[in-house]
């Protein structure tokens, strides 16, 4: 019997939700997602494929393809936004 995605990646449903939210955000890098949740870029793709409708997944992949803001090393040094300062999605924003 196949394991659920949450079990195979050792994530709670709330963690999966947080990964999806951060993945949709243009300025949150895959490195930040990994630092916060332990999910690699390929893991994010697997989560998105499993949790989104096929149309939404294709739309997300099209958005991410070539988007330099999703990888720290591709960002311009002039970019003032630091994605590590993004609010922690597991806690209420005060």
Image (spheres, rainbow, N blue to C red):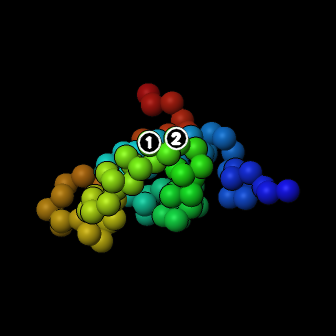
State the mark number for residue 53: 2
Instruction: Please give left or right for residue 49 compared with residue 60 in the image.
Output: right
The image shows residue 50, relative to residue 68, as above or below, that is: above
Instruction: Please give left or right for residue 44 compared with residue 87 in the image.
Output: right
x and y percentages locating residue 6 in the rendered image: 70, 50
Instruction: Please give left or right for residue 86 compared with residue 20 in the image.
Output: left
State the mark number for residue 56: 1
The image shows residue 1, relative to residue 17, as above or below, that is: below
At horizontal 59% and vertical 49% (from top left) the residue drawn is 50
Q: Quadrant of residue 15?
A: top right
Of residues 17 and 88, the one nearer the viewer is 17
Q: Quadrant of residue 72?
A: bottom left
Q: Secondary structure at mark 1?
A: helix
In the displayed orientation, state which residue is furthest to the right. 1
Q: Residues within 10 Å of mark 1 (few under 14, many from 20)?
A: few
In the displayed orientation, state which residue is furthest to the left. 78
x and y percentages locating residue 41 in the rendered image: 48, 64
The image shows residue 77, relative to residue 63, as above or below, that is: below
Residue 62 visible in rendering: yes
């Amino acid at each position: 019997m196949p394991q659920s995605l949450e079990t195979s990646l050792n994530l709670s449903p709330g963690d999966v939700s947080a990964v999806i939210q951060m993945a949709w955000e243009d300025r949150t890098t895959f490195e930040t997602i990994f630092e916060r949740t332990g999910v690699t870029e390929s893991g994010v793709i697997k989560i998105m494929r499993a949790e989104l409708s096929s149309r939404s997944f294709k739309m997300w992949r099209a958005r991410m393809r070539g988007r330099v803001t999703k990888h720290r090393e591709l960002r311009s040094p002039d970019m003032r936004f630091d994605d590590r300062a993004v609010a922690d999605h597991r806690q209420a924003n005060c």
